[in-house]
Image: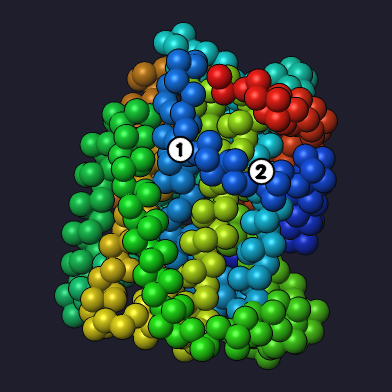
């Protein structure tokens, strides 16, 4: 197992090297310029559109439901465990690079949502199919189909073995253990590993609930997401905001620590300094940031394609709010809480870091604070399991040339099985595997976004002109 973990870690470092980080950042910067920094100019309008549906238009679900489905897949362990992992690995400066990546990532998400609607197709049963595989094939041409197939394959693997199942269930059971049995008193040996009773019970509950909803399809998933996700985001941000306000005098020193660490002025674990510190901070922050908000991965446009809308650019605006909510709001609150509490340099790992921040920052008994975090993490991770099932199933449908009920059902069974075994894998291996598949998904998607940037710019220009004249949303 040790040799396997070392191999996975080596592959992760290779995939998430400087070239991929630079490619994703450059893509976001380039798209920001091409659309005139729409993430700044039209953020208010985007937030308004987020709650206003276009009735009577083609599609399966409302724009808000599509966004909530996307948020259900993005707001998960990445916002709680991922931020903690980024800061403990790359120092407090990782939070700064997460924000930088999110700012430019909003333009990337905008382009993804726009292209998803523009190039979506109707399936034989009337459902709308869209995402990177369709805007690659229909936007770039049939000769680019191998690139679309590669994205779909990586999407299936990411859903099954990475961001969709293992990391999420692992985060849920870890949080449950930290709350109910932090010392591992109720444990037993399973395949040579120490497993707690809490892990088994929590894993079974999540697996059964996920199975019941997943077999209901996109409408079942979206109906759960649009009720649960907004409530939990408000609860979690409110808790983090309470930590910040309770310790408001620590904000200036925390901000200074974050900026110094981001540019290599403050050493991180291991005594590294200078440029190597900055690169470690940048890599950790961007990798975990993308894991959290998925800008550039091409996952969110799969949900965006199902939205009831006739305007590609309008859905692009709605889609980009997902990155704003996920990283600019939720991840920032998590990171500030961790840095202000100093929880990142106590030798803790994973969810224990954020738990420590909540217990030290919230004006409640430690058990109450830990319970709040456990509930938020469990719900976020659970909805991510649901959202990524939809993503990976759509990727599979494209790979096999169309929807097939029997194959979809078989895939769902395998997906649920991956959720079931997830709690029994090691944390480091889990995150490294997720990082690898995220990176592999991003490569074909970013290439397509760059090649289709002219279409994105033209669609944006004509839509904003019509929007100004009041010729849209009638």
Residue under pointer 1:
51
Say which element carries label 1: helix
CA gap between label 1 and label 2 equals: 15 Å
Q: Residue shown at 37%/35% (left/top)?
A: 222
Of labels 1 and 2, earlier in sequence is: 2
Left/right of residue 94 with respect to residue 332 in the rendered view: right
Q: Position of residue 168 (x, y in %)?
A: 39, 55
Up/down of 138 relative to 33, above or below: above
Res 451 → quadrant: top right
Q: Nearer the viewer, residue 79 or 310?
A: 310
Q: Position of residue 10 (x, y in %)?
A: 65, 64
Q: Nearer the viewer, residue 345 or 154?
A: 345
Figure coloring? rainbow
Q: Position of residue 426 (x, y in %)?
A: 42, 66
**Which residue ends up furthest to the top in the rendered image?**
124
Residue under pointer 2:
42
């Amino acid at each position: 197992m040790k040799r396997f973990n070392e191999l996975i870690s080596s592959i992760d470092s290779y995939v998430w090297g400087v070239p991929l980080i630079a490619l994703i950042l450059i893509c976001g910067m380039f798209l920001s310029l091409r659309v005139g920094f729409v993430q700044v100019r039209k953020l208010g309008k985007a937030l308004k559109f987020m709650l206003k549906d276009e009735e009577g238009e083609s599609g399966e679900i409302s724009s808000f439901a599509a966004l909530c489905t996307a948020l259900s897949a993005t707001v998960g362990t990445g916002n709680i465990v991922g931020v903690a992992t980024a800061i403990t690995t790359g120092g407090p400066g990782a939070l700064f690079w997460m924000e930088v990546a999110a700012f430019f990532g909003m333009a990337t998400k905008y382009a993804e949502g726009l292209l998803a609607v523009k190039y979506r197709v109707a399936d034989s049963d009337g459902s709308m199919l869209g995402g990177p595989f369709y805007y690659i094939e229909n936007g770039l041409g049939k000769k680019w189909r191998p690139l679309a197939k590669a994205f779909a394959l990586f999407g299936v693997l990411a859903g099954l073995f990475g961001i969709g199942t293992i990391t999420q269930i692992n985060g849920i059971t870890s949080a449950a253990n930290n709350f109910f049995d932090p010392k591992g008193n109720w444990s037993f040996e399973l395949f040579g590993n120490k497993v707690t009773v809490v892990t088994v019970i929590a894993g079974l509950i999540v697996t059964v609930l996920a199975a019941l909803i997943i077999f209901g399809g996109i409408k079942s998933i979206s109906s759960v997401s649009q009720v649960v996700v907004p409530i939990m985001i408000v609860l979690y941000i409110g808790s983090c905001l309470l930590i910040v306000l309770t310790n408001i005098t620590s904000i200036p020193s925390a901000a200074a620590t974050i900026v110094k660490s981001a540019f290599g002025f403050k050493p991180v674990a291991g005594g590294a300094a200078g440029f190597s510190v900055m690169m470690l901070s940048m890599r950790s922050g961007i990798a975990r940031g993308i894991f959290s908000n998925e800008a550039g991965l091409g996952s969110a446009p799969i949900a965006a394609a199902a939205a009831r809308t006739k305007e590609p650019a309008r859905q692009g605006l709605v889609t980009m709010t997902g990155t704003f909510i996920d990283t600019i709001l939720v991840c920032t609150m998590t990171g500030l809480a961790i840095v202000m509490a100093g929880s990142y340099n106590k030798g803790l790992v994973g969810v224990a870091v954020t738990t420590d921040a909540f217990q030290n920052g919230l004006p409640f008994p430690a058990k109450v604070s830990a319970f709040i975090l456990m509930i938020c993490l469990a719900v976020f991770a659970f909805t991510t399991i649901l959202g990524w099932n939809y993503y990976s199933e759509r990727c599979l449908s494209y790979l096999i040339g169309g929807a097939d009920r029997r194959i979809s059902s078989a895939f769902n069974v395998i997906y649920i099985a991956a959720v079931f075994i997830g709690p029994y894998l090691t944390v480091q291996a889990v995150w490294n595997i997720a990082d690898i598949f995220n990176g592999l998904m991003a490569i074909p998607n970013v290439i397509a976004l760059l090649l289709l940037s002219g279409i994105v710019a033209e669609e944006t220009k004509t839509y904003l002109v019509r929007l100004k004249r009041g010729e849209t949303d009638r």
